[in-house]
């Protein structure tokens, strides 16, 4: 204890001395630059000018004048550059503020004009025809590139909608799993295993991208659909088209001929989420009808960034007057309350989902129907994104993975890396440390959570290996699972390994 105290005091003494040295050095440097060094130069000149000849004096005075002129010119150039930089930054800031103010004023004028026209038309005894309404909408949004998004701005009055939760809406993660499962059964006669629900919730805490895959009829699309009903905010169901090749076929594009942006339902739902504080699920139904790594590439890269403020999706090259208020400099920040849920079938009409997508997503395999059960009356709730994040954060604090399990995972990683050249990378380890605590908080077992990550992130990759040459290693891996985690554990991982062995 005494040694630590001595080191601790000495460390902070040196640290404060270094900080003071930096501050002192800065001001000493300024003093020397403008006062100290000029005085020293003057003293040096006085010390040698006593032996100067007439020519020496002429050359010295000429040099001093030239040096002073050059020094002043340099200071003026630096001052002008700084002045231009700050003026440019100020102009850019004022430009963006002005554009936003013009956008708001323009929309208010349009709203007032539309209200006045509606009031004037109400004096007549007959209603406006559909054609007249269509013409007035065209006139109203004339010159506006984003009609659907502007309607969303006006719908929410440029104000974020708060989510008010009652005490009855607040649960633990374990209660959330049970109540959601009961709601799906009671309201829609949809039956899910608790393990599937817990994996779905823990997956939301692990990644903004989720994949539900398996045979048809097991409730892949229904799961996010009924979850939206449960939290009182319907999920957006988007049908993926086989023609999708890039993000513009998913979000829309600017038509250079009409100067209008072709807004898709996906883009509209994504933009509307910027005005909400509850949870939004955007479902990409049958996402592997097209190549996911092509049309969803921008989202895969952006959502990987640790800072959500950098989730900026390029929409148009620049912002113009009349653009939606939440498009900043032609970019849309992906809202943090959005999750992208893709459903996937495995048949001849679909593409294989690549490791690039799997590694970034939380995937659930649904190949069996759950058993029927009777559920009590279960009402829907309201849940804010912030509250769900609090539950996830608390779970990671309260149910961190045990040291014994981490040691077992480390030994498993060493064996798989050595024999199969597949490793637990930083991304997978981060997902493991996030998923397992949340999964345990959902009322499940720690080893079962580890089994999910190992089977979905590691063992799945064995499909690409030359299986006949690694049969011995696969059989040894089954023994390793039993030694590290117990004979009745790691069921999914062992089942996958045995499936590979049978294929040999």
Image (spheres, rainbow, N blue to C red):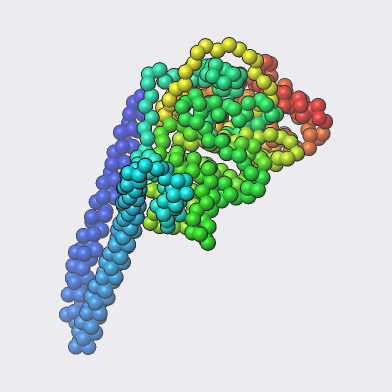
Residue sitting at the far front: 125
What count of labels does the image hold? Answer: 0
Residue sitting at the far bottom: 55
Residue 349 appears at what percent x and percent y? Answer: 73, 40
Residue 403 appears at what percent x and percent y? Answer: 54, 22
Residue at x-position 50% and y-position 13%: 377
49 on left or right of 268: left
Nearer to me, 476 or 365 = 365
Nearer to me, 375 or 96 = 375
Viewport quadrant of the N terminus = top left
Residue at x-position 60% and y-position 30%: 221
Residue at x-position 63% and y-position 48%: 244
Residue 385 appears at what percent x and percent y? Answer: 43, 31
Residue at x-position 69% and y-position 29%: 216
221 on left or right of 9: right
- Asked if one can make out residue 123 in the rendered structure from this viewpoint, the answer is yes
Viewport quadrant of the C terminus = top right
Residue 501 appears at what percent x and percent y? Answer: 79, 27
């Amino acid at each position: 204890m005494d040694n630590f105290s001595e080191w601790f005091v000495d460390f902070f003494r040196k640290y404060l001395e270094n900080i003071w040295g930096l501050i002192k050095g800065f001001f000493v440097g300024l003093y020397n630059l403008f006062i100290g060094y000029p005085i020293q130069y003057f003293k040096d000149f006085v010390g040698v000018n006593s032996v100067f000849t007439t020519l020496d004096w002429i050359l010295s005075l000429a040099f001093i004048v030239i040096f002073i002129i050059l020094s002043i010119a340099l200071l003026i150039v630096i001052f002008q550059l700084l002045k231009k930089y700050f003026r440019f930054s100020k102009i850019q800031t004022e430009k963006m503020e002005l554009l936003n103010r013009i956008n708001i004023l323009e929309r208010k004028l349009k709203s007032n004009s539309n209200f006045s026209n509606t009031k004037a038309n109400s004096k007549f005894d007959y209603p406006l025809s559909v054609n007249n309404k269509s013409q007035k909408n065209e006139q109203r949004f004339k010159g506006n590139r984003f009609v659907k998004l502007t309607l969303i701005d006006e719908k929410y009055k440029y104000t974020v909608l708060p989510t008010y939760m009652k005490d009855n809406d607040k649960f633990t993660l374990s209660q959330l799993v049970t109540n959601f499962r009961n709601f799906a059964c009671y309201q829609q006669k949809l039956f899910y295993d608790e393990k599937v629900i817990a994996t779905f919730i823990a997956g939301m805490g692990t990644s903004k991208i989720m994949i539900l895959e398996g045979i048809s009829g097991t409730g892949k699309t229904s799961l996010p659909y009924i979850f939206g009903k449960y939290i009182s905010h319907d999920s957006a169901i988007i049908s993926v088209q086989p023609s999708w090749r890039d993000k513009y076929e998913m979000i829309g594009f600017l038509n250079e001929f009409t100067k209008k942006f072709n807004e898709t339902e996906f883009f509209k739902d994504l933009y509307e989420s910027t005005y909400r504080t509850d949870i939004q699920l955007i479902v990409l139904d049958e996402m592997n009808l097209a190549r996911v790594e092509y049309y969803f590439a921008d989202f895969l890269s952006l959502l990987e960034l640790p800072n959500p403020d950098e989730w900026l999706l390029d929409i148009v090259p620049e912002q113009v007057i009349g653009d939606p208020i939440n498009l900043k400099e032609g970019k849309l920040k992906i809202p943090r309350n959005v999750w992208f849920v893709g459903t996937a079938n495995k048949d001849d009409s679909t593409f294989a989902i690549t490791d690039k997508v799997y590694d970034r997503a939380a995937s659930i395999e649904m190949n069996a129907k759950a058993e029927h059960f009777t559920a009590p009356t279960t009402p829907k709730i309201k849940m804010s994104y912030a509250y769900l994040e609090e539950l996830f954060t608390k779970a990671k604090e309260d149910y961190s993975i045990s040291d014994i399990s981490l040691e077992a995972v480390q030994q498993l990683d060493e064996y798989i890396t050595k024999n199969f050249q597949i490793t637990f990378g930083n991304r997978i380890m981060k997902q493991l440390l996030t998923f397992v605590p949340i999964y345990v908080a959902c009322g499940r077992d720690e080893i079962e959570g580890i089994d999910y990550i190992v089977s979905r992130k590691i063992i799945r990759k064995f499909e690409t290996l030359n299986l006949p040459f690694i049969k011995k290693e696969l059989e040894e891996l089954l023994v390793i699972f039993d030694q590290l985690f117990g004979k009745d554990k790691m069921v999914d991982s062992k089942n996958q390994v045995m499936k590979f062995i049978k294929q040999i």
